[in-house]
Amino acid sequence: MTKFESSVKVIPHSQERVYGKLSNLNNLESLKDRLPQEQIKDMTFDADTLSFSVAPVGQLTLKIIEREPCKCIKFEAVGSPIPFNLWIQLVAIGDDECKIRITAGLEINPFMKAMVQKPLHDGLEKMVDTLSMINYD
């Protein structure tokens, strides 16, 4: 499995508060307006599953497969042409501050890696930027 990582961002909220919001996908309703509508469409979700259409890939579904309270939320792609997983890692750096990083793991060959590396890294950076800027109150 090939791993890709976002940069680490600091969130001015406690690790517990951030984890509480991100570990229940129903809380993503407030993020819908911040997503690039020309790239991400038809977003639906429940507490454990997130589905959306993304150009040029098509329909994607991510399902939470593991929650490590306050530290990590692991997702797995369902029905994706390329098997992959995604995890959100949180680390406390104080009572009201934490770090976040997003990691993706893909089952791809070296040729595919060269093709997807830049767009995937850019996507992870956009995701971590968005998650670091939302209101966790």
Image (cartoon, rainbow, N blue to C red):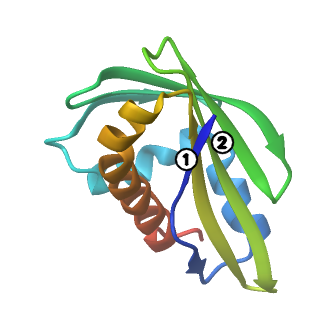
User: What residue is drawn where x is 66% and y is 75%?
Assistant: 99
Above or below for 120 versus 129: above
Query: What amino acid does circle 2 point to?
Result: Asn
The disc at residue 24 is 2
User: What residue is drawn where x is 38% and y is 48%?
Assistant: 117
The disc at residue 108 is none
Above or below for 24 versus 20: above
User: What residue is drawn where x is 36% and y is 60%?
Assistant: 126
Above or below for 137 versus 110: below
Query: What amino acid does circle 1 point to?
Result: Asn
Above or below for 58 versus 26: above
Residue positioned most to the front: 110
Judged from the image, the secondary structure of the residue bearing numbered disc 2 is loop
Name the spot of residue 62 as percent of width and height, x first. 54, 28
Q: Label 1 to label 2, Cα distance in Å? A: 6 Å
Question: Is 21 or 103 nearer to us in this picture?
Answer: 103
Name the spot of residue 84 as percent of width and height, x first. 56, 29
Judged from the image, the secondary structure of the residue bearing numbered disc 1 is helix
Where residue 29 sits, quadrant-wise, is top left
Name the spot of residue 35 as percent of width and height, x first. 29, 51
User: What residue is drawn where x is 28% and y is 25%?
Assistant: 57
Judged left or right of residue 102, residue 67 is right
The disc at residue 27 is 1
Where residue 124 sits, quadrant-wise, is bottom left
Disc 1 to disc 2: CB gap under 8 Å: yes
Residue positioned most to the top: 79
